[in-house]
Each structure stands twice: as C-alpha cells, then as structure tokens.
Image (cartoon, grey):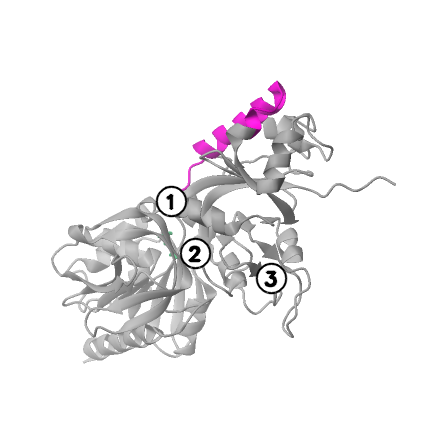
C-alpha cells in the first residue's frame, strides 16, 4: 500500500517569504492583502464583515473554528475574505448552535483556508514590514484545475496558473522536482525565504514561482471595485415607526442594521454611489455612513454626496450624520481632511480608545487599515477620540452641527458593546431635528 501524501498549500508574500501549511476550506488559490486580526473569538463575524473584501485574514488566536459556524452570527450573506489563515482549524466543533465546521463553510463558499502555519511569525512579519500582499497557493488542485490566481477583478494575471496543468511542481499532487531538499527545510522550519527554495529548483518551477511572485507584487490592494462589490445593488427599505434614516451602504455589517432597527428606525438603505438629491428626496431625519472595504479615497462619488449634506444652507435644519469606520473616513474627506494608510492597521476586539471629553477609555472592536490625518482637519471639526495604543484619530465631532463619527465599531459583532450608546445619541439628534422642523 502506498502512503497518501498529505495535500500542501502555501502562503507566498510579496517580500518572498513562503509558508507551507495544510489546506482547508476550498482547495483553490487566491490573492489579497494579508492582514491580521487579534480577536480570540468572533471568527464568523470577521469572515462575513464586508470591510475585509479583498483581504486574506490571519488570526493570531491559535485555535479557530471550535464553536463551529451557525446561521445567526453572519454579518453579511457570505464570507467576504479572499482567504483565511489559522494556526489550527478545529475539525470537531462543540457548541449547541454549531451547524457546520469552518472547513465545510469555507469550502461551500469557495474561500481557500490555510492552517498549520506559524501565525505568530506571519503576524510579526506584517508588523515589521507593514501589510503585505500575498497569495494562498493550493498544491493539490488549485493550479492544475486551471484556476487563476487573479483578484476578484482579474487584476493580477498569471499565465502559469492557467495553463500549467500539472507541469509545475505545485500543480501536481506528486512531488515536484524541487520538492526535495528545499522543501525539507521548509517543512522543518514551516517558513523560509523563497530564495532558498529557488536555489534548489529546476528552470520550469523557478519560472512558475517567479510568475507567482510577480503577480503578488503587482496585485492592487485597493480600488473602487471593493466597495462596488459589497454595496447593495438597489435601494431598499426596512420599515420602522421611528426616525427615518438614510443609510449609505458601503458594505454594511448586519449588526448596524439590527441595532438601528432595535431603536425603531425606518431604514432607507442606499447604494454607495447615490447622489445627494435622491437621498434628500427620501426626506430622511438623519444620514448614516456605513463601514466598508478599501481606501476611502476610492469612493469619490460618496465623498461628493456627503459634502453636500455638510455644506451650510443646503437644508433648513442640518441633517444629523453618524459615520462608522469607512463612513468616518468618508466624512473626514468630505469635510476636506486627508486620510493615510496605517502600517498594519487595527483589527481585533480589544483596542483601547479614549474619549477626549471625559477621559474615559472604552474597549472597542476595530477593523481598519486607513486613518484620518488630523493635521488636515478643517475648522469646525475636532478629534473626539484617540487610540490608546498609537494615539491615532478614533473619532471626529463637528463643533456646531449634529455630526460625528468613529473609526471603531460601536456595533461590535464581534467585540464589546461598550460604545453602543453612540447609536442613542444619533437617535436623540434626529428627534431634536424632527421637533425643530415641525415647530
Ligand atoms: N471597517 C471599515 O469600514 C474599514 C474602513 C477602511 N476600509 C479601512 O480599512 O480603513
């Protein structure tokens, strides 16, 4: 009897680092910006948060999947990540709510998973070098089946992936010509620089890996396609008896809608690129700006729309505005401020944030890679919150208008609900406006 060789999958980073691990979920290949999340739980909410579109997420907590996957904890209709990396993917979940394993769930939604790699080492690399582009490359069948390593929009093209069909080492279930000494070193250390592997391989394999690396390095990690891929294609209404909220959907998490709904709001949800006139025609009492993926500067039409509601004199009574995460960044851009990319971002469920008015510190849920450059904030706007770890801007407030936003996630999911009262303040602002308008 011949021994069955366990399938292998790889994570290749743009700096040439290669990790070898065990595939789970969908046995395919994909590319994305590799980011880490430090949450101990909440993997299902992380996977389904549309803000992660275009990204391969690695979890620093070593055991993921232990309470399974259920239909109640999703933050959108499907997992949104491009790939998922864990130290150990639990194969036998134990929880009364569990309906399936993480492996099954990711396979069902064609999201490649990679387990068995040293996620601490990967996270340290991201912290040292900043966020890195990467590819999950599936050894067993990802390449051989003609699956491209392309991004969602086919941006990084790679001919080797499509036509190799078993010719190159990692396409085949059999050992590659170079998968001898070089990979023995990889197996032992679980991680190596690609250069060490290059030294051992034949011409064809070398060419193939150079192609992978080139594709990874050329991968665009932002662009308007990200928000376009997760915003609602059409406006819709979630009826309620309370305040009429125009929600600009850049990839909204379900829990924001659930929380506004629980406060009786009548929710009018609009696609990301809805012009101001259309929103105004719906006669809202307030404007909510959602979270979402990518670089806020790529959502130009929304910046224009939000700016319209910020300019004085455009409405009898200024419209209360509340923004979360991407919504917070878009509000700042609309006000004339600038944003920049953080080295490796904030993603997790225990980020300390200080409210500068009270000095009180809240533990917050976060998921962002960009931040507001406070030097560029125009007159009228003040920084309301700061991150306890790196002092970056975590909240903005207008000095006169009922307009505020936070970089973190008061809706949690996953994470603590310490800041849920920010929704109540939005409701109070809208009620005050309704009274003034009807007076
Ligand atoms: N959660 C979000 O809305 C993220 C906002 C933005 N995409 C960022 O990474 O900074």
Q: Name the quadrant containing residue 279.
A: bottom left
Q: Main secondary structure of the magenta part?
A: helix
Mark 3 or mark 2, earlier in chain? 3
**Residue pointed to by mark 1:** 128
**Residue pointed to by mark 3:** 65
Q: Which residues are magenta?
A: 197-222
Which residue corresponds to the image point at 54% horizontal and 62% vertical from the top-left? Answer: 44
Label 2: how many residues lie within 10 Å, few (<14), some (14-19) or many (20+)?
many
Q: Position of residue 218 (x, y in %)?
A: 44, 32
Mark 2 or mark 1, earlier in chain? 1
Q: Position of residue 115 (x, y in %)?
A: 60, 50
Placement of 311 over or under 159, stated as above or below: below
Is ligand 1 within 8 Å of the beta carbon of the residue shown at mark 1?
no
Give the Cα distance between marks 3 and 2.
24 Å
SS label for mark 3: loop
Give the Cα distance between marks 1 and 3.
28 Å
Q: Quadrant of the C terminus?
A: bottom left
Q: Position of residue 363 (x, y in %)?
A: 35, 70
Is ligand 1 within 8 Å of the beta carbon of the residue shown at mark 2?
yes
């Amino acid at each position: 009897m011949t021994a069955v060789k366990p399938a292998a999958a790889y994570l290749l980073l743009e700096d040439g680092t290669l990790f070898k691990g065990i595939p789970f979920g969908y046995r395919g290949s994909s590319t994305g910006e590799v980011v880490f999340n430090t949450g101990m739980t909440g993997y299902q909410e992380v996977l389904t948060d549309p803000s992660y579109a275009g990204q391969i997420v690695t979890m620093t907590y070593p055991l993921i999947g232990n309470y399974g996957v259920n239909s109640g904890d999703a933050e959108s209709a499907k997992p949104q990540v491009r790939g998922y990396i864990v130290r150990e993917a639990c194969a036998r979940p134990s929880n009364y709510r569990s309906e399936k394993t993480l492996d099954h769930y990711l396979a069902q939604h064609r999201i490649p998973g990679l387990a068995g790699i040293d996620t601490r080492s990967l996270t340290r690399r991201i912290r040292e070098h900043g966020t890195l582009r990467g590819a999950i490359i599936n050894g067993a069948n990802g390449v051989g089946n003609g699956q491209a390593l392309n991004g969602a929009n086919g941006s990084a093209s790679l001919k080797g992936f499509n036509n190799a069909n078993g010719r190159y080492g990692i396409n085949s279930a059999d050992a590659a010509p170079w998968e001898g000494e070089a990979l023995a070193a990889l197996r032992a250390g679980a991680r190596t620089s690609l250069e060490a592997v290059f030294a051992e391989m034949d011409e064809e394999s070398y060419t193939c890996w150079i192609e992978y690396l080139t594709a990874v390095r050329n991968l665009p990690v932002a662009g308007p396609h990200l928000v376009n891929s997760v915003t609602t294609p059409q406006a819709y209404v979630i009826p309620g008896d309370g305040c009429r909220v125009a929600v600009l959907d850049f990839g909204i998490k379900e829990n924001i809608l659930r929380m506004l709904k629980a406060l009786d709001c009548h929710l009018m949800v609009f696609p990301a690129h809805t012009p101001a006139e259309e929103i105004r025609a719906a006669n809202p009492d307030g404007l909510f700006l959602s979270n979402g993926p990518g670089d806020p500067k790529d959502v130009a039409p929304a910046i224009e729309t939000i700016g319209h509601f910020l300019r004085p004199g455009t409405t009898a009574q200024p419209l209360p505005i509340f923004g979360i995460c991407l919504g917070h960044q878009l509000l700042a851009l609309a006000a004339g401020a600038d944003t920049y990319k953080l080295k490796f971002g904030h993603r997790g469920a225990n980020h300390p944030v200080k409210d500068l008015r009270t000095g009180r510190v809240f533990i917050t849920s976060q998921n962002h890679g960009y931040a507001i450059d406070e030097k560029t904030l125009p007159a009228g706007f003040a920084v309301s919150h700061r991150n306890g770890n790196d002092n970056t801007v975590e909240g903005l407030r207008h000095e006169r208008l009922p307009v505020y936003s936070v970089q973190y996630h008061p809706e949690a999911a996953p994470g603590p609900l310490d800041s849920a009262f920010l929704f109540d303040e939005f409701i109070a602002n809208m009620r005050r406006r309704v009274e003034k308008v009807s007076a």
